[in-house]
């Protein structure tokens, strides 16, 4: 008798959306490797974020789209290599005790061809730089890909982050630049630890990265928690939906530890309504709706804590936000924290970003964790003559 998992039918129902999500991301990826945040949304069009992109690449990698993820990492590495001089100046100024202004730091998002672009943005956010290093090292481990290809990008990122990681900067939501954000620290810890594990750093940089990770972890525990759970920023008493990612997929805080479990509970209690997760309680962006990508991150944290049923319920909630076109939005307005603030954003930037590739990627990532793997077309078999020649 074959064993059929009790939730198999529920998983099977979600499989087509997982497959179409992978196909959508693959189709929209730029030839140069960049993943657009959202192809048509007025404020994001033409730009790729390190943060979104790193998580998208992680989702694609986990789904078996090895080449797609590798090409995104190529794009990241080339952006860093082209800014070697700027990074050198940032590092030198920091070492001389006269740090450069925020405006001199690396950008948050880039055009597909690797430029800063002409539109103003809330630049200086360090999280994405940590996240891409974490994601590329995970990717290499998962698929046994040599890391030398991204070695220079990893080294430059470590130099940049070692010089800047303690600085307050904008958070995942491109807000509150006066604070040091715990989710950002989580991304930086993951990045430092991955950089060390990659074996690509020179000994002195590896020692410094190891020490920075230890120091950042201590900071999180000492000043980045409240009543036993992770907090939005150092000294805050509130939570943020992005903190789920520090538990999973980043794995910086063990989901089954007291801190991990209390944080999952706190996010659930404060921000999760029927499976839909808000960013934070005072969110007013598009009225402060629920974000499918955060629902999936909370689902990943539940899965890491061993609660598969809750993880699957989170996945189902996220999947149910799909539009008739098969697209997942950035957020849905079913439960708004600030309903009277929605119209102003629609007027300013148009309807909510849809599709948001990061939403699709997190659905793919959580689905993979629960056992739904999309069928990836295998590389075409070379003609017999080439096979013989290769032998
Ligand atoms: C979000 C960011 C995201 C960006 C692109 C912003 O509205 O706050 O987290 O990186 O959109 O998707």
Image: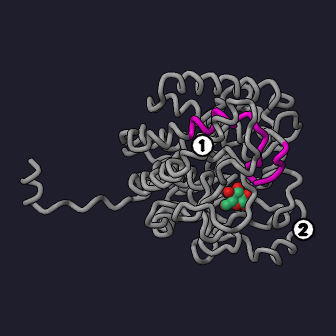
Q: Which residue is mark 1?
A: 87
Other-residue count near label 2 (Cα within 10 Å), few / some / many at <14 / 14–19 / ≥20:
some
Other-residue count near label 1 (Cα within 10 Å), few / some / many at <14 / 14–19 / ≥20:
many
Q: Is residue 228 magenta?
A: no
Q: Main secondary structure of the magenta part?
A: loop
Q: Residue at x 87, y 73 (%)?
A: 344
Above/below status of 326 relative to 160: below
Q: Residue at x 48, y 39 (%)?
A: 137
Indicate the position of residue 118 as horizontal and vertical percent values.
67, 68
Residue 312 marker:
none
Looking at the image, the residue that sits furthest to the right is 340
Figure disc tally = 2
- Label 1 to label 2, Cα distance in Å? 39 Å
Q: Which residues are magenta?
A: 157-178
Indicate the position of residue 289 as horizontal and vertical percent values.
80, 62
Q: Is residue 384 left or right of residue 88?
A: left
Indicate the position of residue 22 as horizontal and vertical percent values.
48, 62
**Which of pointers 1 and 2 indicates the residue nearer the eye?**
1
Q: Which residue is mark 2?
A: 341
Above/below status of 264 relative to 290: above
């Amino acid at each position: 008798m074959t064993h059929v998992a009790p939730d198999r039918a529920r998983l099977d129902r979600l499989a087509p959306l997982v497959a179409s999500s992978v196909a959508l991301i693959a189709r929209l990826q730029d030839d140069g490797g960049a993943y657009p945040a959202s192809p048509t949304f007025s404020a994001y069009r033409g730009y790729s974020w390190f943060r979104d992109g790193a998580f998208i690449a992680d989702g694609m990698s986990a789904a078996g789209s090895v080449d797609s993820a590798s090409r995104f990492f190529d794009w990241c590495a080339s952006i860093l290599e082209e800014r070697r001089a700027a990074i050198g100046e940032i590092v030198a100024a920091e070492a001389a005790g006269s740090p450069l202004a925020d405006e001199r730091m690396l950008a948050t998002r880039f055009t597909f061809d690797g430029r800063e672009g002409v539109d103003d943005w809330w630049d200086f956010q360090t999280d994405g730089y940590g996240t891409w290093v974490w994601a590329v090292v995970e990717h290499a481990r998962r698929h046994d890909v040599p890391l030398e290809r991204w070695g220079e990008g990893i080294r430059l990122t470590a130099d940049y982050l070692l010089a800047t990681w303690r600085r307050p900067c904008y958070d995942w939501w491109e807000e509150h630049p006066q604070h040091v954000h715990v989710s950002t620290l989580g991304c930086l810890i993951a990045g430092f630890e991955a950089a060390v594990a990659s074996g690509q750093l020179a000994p002195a940089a590896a020692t410094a990265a190891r020490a920075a990770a230890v120091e950042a972890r201590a900071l999180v525990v000492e000043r980045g928690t409240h009543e036993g759970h992770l907090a939005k920023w150092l000294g805050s008493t509130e939570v943020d939906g992005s903190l789920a990612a520090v538990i999973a997929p980043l794995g910086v805080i063990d989901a089954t530890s007291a801190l991990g479990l209390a944080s999952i509970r706190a996010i659930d209690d404060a921000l999760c309504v029927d499976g839909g997760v808000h960013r934070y309680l005072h969110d007013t962006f598009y009225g402060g709706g629920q974000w499918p990508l955060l629902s999936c991150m909370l689902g990943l944290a539940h899965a890491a804590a061993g609660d598969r049923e809750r993880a699957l319920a989170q996945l189902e909630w996220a999947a149910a936000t799909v539009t008739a076109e098969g697209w997942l939005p950035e957020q849905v307005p079913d439960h708004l924290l600030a309903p009277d603030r929605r119209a102003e954003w629609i007027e300013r930037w148009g309807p909510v970003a849809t599709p948001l590739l990061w939403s699709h990627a997190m659905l793919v990532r959580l689905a993979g964790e629960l056992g739904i793997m999309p069928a990836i077309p295998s590389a075409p078999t070379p003609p017999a003559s080439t096979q013989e020649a290769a032998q």
